Amino acid sequence: MKILSWNVNQGKDYRNLIDMINILNDYRSDVIFLHEFINNRHGQIIRNTMDELGWKYHYFTGIGSMSGILILSRKNFSPSRCNYKKPSKSYGWLDILFDDCRISILAVNIPHDDRFMNKDEYWERLLEYSRIKTVDDCLIISTMHSDNEMPEYLQSINEITRTGWVDLIEEHQWKTHKEKGDGSIPERFDYAFASKMAYNSVTTAYLSKYEREKGFTRPAMVLEVL
């Protein structure tokens, strides 16, 4: 199963609809997660076009949130749980069950000046969840917020891996994959962790350079699972 996860920047990255749809099709994925997706006119065109091309879709958003997650899939899936923390209503956990895989997504929106939640709260929430998550065959996909402070987010990743999760980008892209980054860290980018059991099924995990070459702001993440 090939998974594409892409933070589309609350609509700023899908104004060029033809390029966006072409990129989504170029990856030949089985499942696509579009984070910070706004279901406005442009978003509806993308959603409806992908539907016409044979993709099942489901759109999730927190109550009061402007953006959410659009799930596009060629495989059958069902949502297991979606918990949003009040009062911010701006992020939550979404568990998705496929026939052969369980994926947990952190839906999050962290503006620089968020009066409801700061980055420390976000990391606390991520760490809290990674500690209590006991499913053996699970992947966690989340939008990371670097704020151009590399040591800060690397320290947080290290804390997550100490709870037993495997850093998939570290294990695959930085060591073996041909699409190594140029060293620059975008403000937000998708990232993935795996339980030790699920890690054995992951064959590829990397941040792509393709979207930036096409003029989009943020890179997509690609996972391949046996």
Image (cartoon, rainbow, N blue to C red):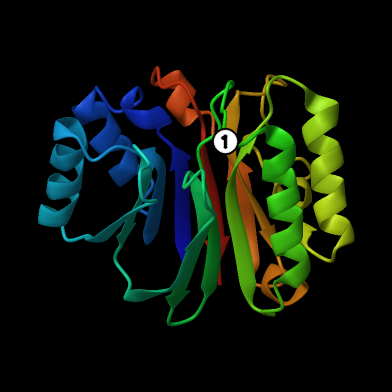
Q: Vertically, is 149 above or below 38?
A: above
Which residue corresponds to the image point at 68% horizontal and 22% vertical from the top-left? 147
Observer-nearest residue: 45 or 69? 69
Q: Position of residue 138 (x, y in %)?
A: 62, 72
Picture quadrant where residue 221 is located: top right
Q: Of the residues shown, which amino acid type is indicated by label 1? A: Phe
Which residue corresponds to the image point at 49% horizontal and 27% vertical from the top-left? 218
Observer-nearest residue: 148 or 184? 148
Q: Vertically, is 152 above or below 221?
A: above
Neighbours of disc 1 within 10 Å: few (<14), some (14-19), many (20+): few
Instruction: Note whether residue 48 is visible.
Output: yes
Q: Is residue 77 left or right of residue 194?
A: left
Q: How many numbered badges does the structure rendering display?
A: 1
Q: Vertically, is 10 above or below 113?
A: below
Q: Position of residue 9 (x, y in %)?
A: 42, 29
Q: Secondary structure at mark 1?
A: loop
Q: Vertically, is 186 above or below 6?
A: above
